[in-house]
Each structure stands twice: as C-alpha cells, then as structure tokens.
Amino acid sequence: MPTLHQQPVPAMLVPFFKKEGIKIKKYSSPASFERDLKRFLKRNHVLHLGTSRGSQPRVTPLEYRLVGLSFYILSEGGGKFSNLKDNKKVGFSIAEPYDSEEDFFGNKGVQAWGTAKMYSRRENPKKFNAVLKKLNIMKLLKRFGMKEVPPEFSYRIIEITPHKIKYGNPREGVYHVTWKKT
C-alpha cells in the first residue's frame, strides 16, 4: 500500500495563497492523491528520463504512455539503453511550462524515481508485442499507413515502475506531496 507525505505550506506563504484564492488539498488516502496525479500525467506526454552509467549521467526527453502508474516508452536507440543495461534505477521529471513573473504559483511538475525494464522485439518478441498492444501503438501506426513497427530500427520498450513520486501544482491545490510505494 502506498504512503503519502504532504509538506505543510510554510506560514510565510499562507497569506499569499489566501490572496491568490489557492486552497491546498488535504489528501485522505493515497488513492485520492493518485486521481489528481494521474490527471496531470495524462495531460502530459513527455518526460525527461535520467539514466547513469558509472559517473556519467544522461537525461533524455521521451514521449511516454501511462498505464496505471507505470510509464512506457518506445524508443529506437541511444545511450540510455547502454546505461539501463548497467543500472536499472532511473529518475525522471515532467513539467508544464510556466512564467513565474506572470504567475508565481503556476508551477506544475513531477519528480520520480523508479526501476526500468527493457523489452526488445529481438530478445523478447512476445512481451514486446503484448506491450505494443496494451499501449495501442498500432492505432497510431495505421494513421501513418504502417502495419507494424518498422523492422529497420532496433525498437525497444522501456517500462518504468516508480517507487517514489513528488508532485507539486499549487494552482490546483497540490503542495509538495510525496507518494511512496511500500
């Protein structure tokens, strides 16, 4: 069962939140928080994936698909795969653009930590195709007149299972909430 930690709004910020009409939510359960978190995650599609190998970090912007709280990425290559062979632990962030001079409390974003698995068409075709089906990738490919993922590329799927997610979105009432899988 996941746990939640809600950081209290610092006393010095309370009058500013009140002036702006911001009401911070108090979540009664992880499930109630997950509903708001998923709403944010579903309206976004790009995460910045952090991988590392030895002392070499790498961050890559990638499109994701969400199933529950698992993140799936279809990618054809890059250094992230070499890193993931050595180290399955990843971090990522997702943020919406905002201008702090226009709306200081308009920041919206997620930081997450988790474990990645990789599936390749070559090494695990059954699992690879099952995930493609689950993500409804074929519907997208059909729009481009394609019947399959192009075989010329060495496509792989990255599945990320987060164990910790921090979410902040003051305008929507979410102030520094941390969700942890136990």
Image (cartoon, rainbow, N blue to C red):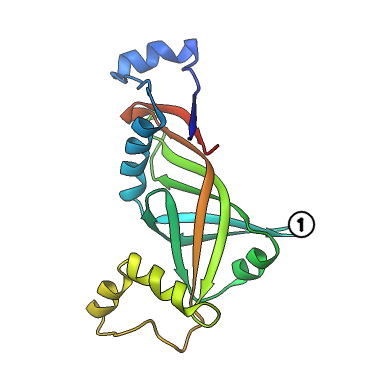
Q: Which residue is drawn at 66% across and 67% down?
A: 85
- Which residue bears the numbered disc 1? 55
Q: In this view, does 84 lie above or below 162?
A: below
Q: Position of residue 158 (x, y in %)?
A: 51, 64
Q: In this view, does 57 lie to the left or right of 20?
A: right
Secondary structure of the residue carrying tag 1 is loop
Q: In which quarter of the image is residue 32?
A: top left
Q: Which of 7 and 21 is in front in this view?
A: 7
Is residue 108 visible in the rendered structure shown here? yes
Residue at position x 48%, y 11% from top?
12
On the image, the x and y values in percent for residue 70 come to: 44, 53
Q: In this view, does 21 lie to the left or right of 50?
A: left
State which quadrant residue 72 falls in: bottom left
Q: Which residue lies furthest to the bottom in this view?
A: 152
Residue 102 appearing in the image = no
Amino acid type of disc 1?
A: Ser
The residue nearer to you, when weighing 137 against 181, is 181
- Residue farthest along the right direction in this orientation: 54
Q: Quadrant of the C terminus?
A: top right
The image shows residue 22, relative to residue 147, as above or below, that is: above
In the foreground, 33 or 43? 33
Please state the total of marks drawn on the protein image: 1
Q: For the residue carrying disc 1, how many other residues have a C-alpha within 10 Å: few (<14), some (14-19), or many (20+)?
A: few
Name the side, left or right, on which 52 lies relative to 115: right
Say which residue appears at 45% left-offset and 77% top-offset: 126
Question: Where residue 143 sits: x, y (%)?
Answer: 23, 77
